[in-house]
Each structure stands twice: as structure tokens, then as C-alpha cells.
Amino acid sequence: MSGLSAEQAESLSTFQAVTSIESEDEARRRLEAASWDLQVAVEAFLSGETEPTVPSNEERDADSSGSMNTGVRSALNAVSGVTSSRPQRRRFRGFFRVLFFPIWLVFSIASYIGERISNFVRGPPRIAYDADQSETANFVRRFDILYSNLHPRFFEGTYLEALAAAGARFQFLLVFLHSEMHPASVRFCRQVLGSREVIRYIDENVIFWARGIASPEGYRAQRLLGVTTYPFVALITSPPGRSDGVTLSEYNSDAGDFLQWLQTMSARFGTTLTRRRLHVEERDEARQLREQQDREYHETLEADRRREQAAKEAAEQAAEQERLKREAEEEELRKRAELVERREGKRVALGEEPEKGPGVTTIGLRLPDGKRVDRRFLVSDKVAILFDWADINGVSIEHAALVSSFPRRTYQYPEDADKTLEEAGLSQGTMLLVEERADL
């Protein structure tokens, strides 16, 4: 529902719930064609129109006035048994009804005309409308005052919201529309809707939505259902068709007949709700299965990706370690080669030992492995030549110091490298030890 306002998103959700259109794009296209008028879009869907049109004020007035002037036709239809869902009567009752039909017809028309004249003269009781309350609350309040406070539980909301709720709960929607001017309203509201058995059945099995046709929601429902007779009762499955699942009951039924009608219609059309519930459950199960399969597929892909990534990282790490090892070995070989080359250069530079004589001293060197080496040097030679000699014999001169035992003197490289042996006190010959430098 991207790009929609909160109100449009709510209208889209309600429209899909009422019409059972699963495609969000299709539902959105219909609402956009109706300029997001939910009422117009639903009417167009029920009537099969492809391009919904918004009715003008004159058309609404004409429809309203036409629906209010059909009382005589409703009385004739009810008496003659025109409605398709009238409970079946026993044969002897049908015989008496045919026998007394002319008397009953005259009496019904006379009663209706008398009631209309009486209502026109005195009008219905004046009950103040509370603007602070909802339309449902005002309807219930008026119903309690005019008829009885003993009645089924009314659904709080619009007709379309009731349809959506019934569709979501897989229940029937029982719609009741009536006119206070109709003579049958009092009897139906008090005796039928006031029956405890009827109340219990309605509260336990259906969603009950009711309005007077003078109210805005009552007018909308009357337009959607095409109501021409009152009181009007319909048992509707959501989404409603033009005729399938919609059944009218006679206004002159007693509570027992009405309850039997409800039970009969519920049994007859209950399979529709069952099929729809099973369809939705199968669709939800299929969706959940697809989501589970997609989730497992993506989890498998993610696991494979992590394994590949781990294998790649391990290979890269192994390659890096191998590279570092190879570089370290190469560096070690290079250093060894440099060391060998350096020491060989120093060996060549050191030359032959001088012969014994004046200006010549003998120096002994105790190596770290315990081995002792001796060599003669000129007293004019630099101390650096001693470190070269020690280096040639495997001493790491960067980390070692040469130490004379008596007197104890320490010679370090390169600090003492430029001193002569005579200046360093090594002209008389001495034994030098190799020790690790303490300052490193």
C-alpha cells in the first residue's frame, strides 16, 4: 500500500474485505476509478459496472422518495407470498389463506391507509438526536424508546464495516432495514426481535446490523441492496451477490417463523461460508507454505553463502599465511646470505695475522658456545676490528658486548668502535668474554 494515505489504505482494506478481491492492484484500480469513494466503488462492483459513477443529489432524493412510497406494494407482496424465502406452511393453512384472501387483502390495505393517515396527522414521537453519539448509538437509543430495550446486539459501525467483519469472521450478516411509518414495524421490532430465542440465536450465530432508512447509512444500505419493501431482513454472505445468499423474510412472520427462517437459511447457505473459509484457509496455508519454502530456500542460500565465504576466507588466510611464511623464509635466506657475504667481506678485510713483535698484542675470545679463539692484532688497530673478528666467529655484534675480566671493562658496538686497542687498554693482551648487552 505504498503511496497511499492512511484513509486510502483503510478504504482499500475495507473494499477488499467486502468484495473478496484478492488482487490489491485490481481493488486499487476500482477505487481510483471511483475517486476513492468507497460507497460508489462497492455499488459498481455489485452491479458489475466497469466505470463507477457518483450519483447526483437529485438521484439520491429520487431514490429515497421512491423507497419510502412502496409500503402498499410491500403489504401486497407480503400477503400474497411473493418473497422467495417464506417458510413452508402446512397445507390446511394455505387453504384457509386462499379462502380468506379477499377479506385479508381489504383489511390489510385499509389498516395500512389508516395507519398512514394516523402517522401523518400525529407523526412519530419526537426524539432528540444526540450529535455527540454515533449513528448506531442514536439508532439503538431510538429503538429502545419506540419499541423495546430487549433486542439482539447491534453491530457498531457502517454497513460496509459490518460486511467486512462478517467476511473476516466467516459469519452471516443479518441486515434489518425498517421505516417507522410502516405499520408492521412495531410488531416486528417488539415481538420478533424482542423474542429471547431470536435474540440468543442472532447473538450467537450472526452479525446483526440494523438502521432506519431515514439515516445516511440506512439509505446507503437500501441503495446497495435495492430494498423496496419494509421491514426488510436479509441474511447475507460477504461478499454479497445480486441475489445469491440474500433472502428476505415476511414482515408479518411471528418469532417462531422468523427463527425457523434464520435456521433454514443458515443451513442452506452455510456451505457458502464453509467453502469460503476452507478456500481462505487453503490459500493461507499455501501462502504460509510458500513463505516457509522461500524462507528455507533463502536460509539455505545464506548458509551456502556463509560456507563459501568461510571457505574463501580460510583459503585467503591460508594463502596469506603461506605468503608470509614464504616471505619470512626468503627474508631469512636473504639475511643469511647478507650475513655470509658480510662476514666473508670482513674475513678478507681482516687479512693475515701480524707476526709477534713490538706493537703486537694477542687477544683471546670466549664464544657463547664455550669455544675459545685467539688472534694477534696491532695495538694501533681499532676496536672495531675486534667486533669484525667476533662477527666472523658467529657473534651477533648488534646485541653483544665484549667484556674483559680483569680489570673489568665493557666494549660496545658502535660506541667504542673508533678507539685503538692501546686506547682501550687492550695492548697487553687479554681474554674477552661475549655478553648480552644490558641496554637492549
Image: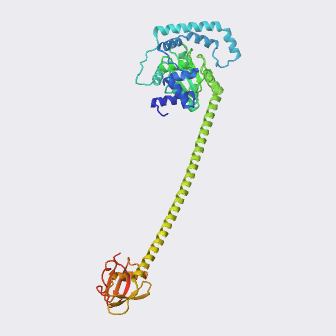
Nearer to me, 196 or 69: 69
| Vertical side of 98 occupied by 189: above or below | below
Regarding residue 210, the answer to whether it shows in the image is no
Regarding residue 80, the answer to whether it shows in the image is yes
Q: Quadrant of residue 109?
A: top right
The answer to whether residue 183 is left or right of residue 423 is right
Residue lying at 64% horizontally and 6% vertically, measured from the top left: 102
- Image coordinates for residue 71, horizontal then vertical, percent: 55, 11
- Image coordinates for residue 286, horizontal then vertical, percent: 61, 39
Residue lying at 48% horizontally and 16% vertically, measured from the top left: 214
The C terminus lies in quadrant: bottom left
- Image coordinates for residue 280, horizontal then vertical, percent: 60, 34
Q: Residue furthest bottom?
A: 357
| Vertical side of 13 occupied by 92: above or below | above
Q: Quadrant of residue 107?
A: top right
Nearer to me, 366 or 309: 366
Label total for image: 0
Residue lying at 40% horizontally and 24% vertically, measured from the top left: 132
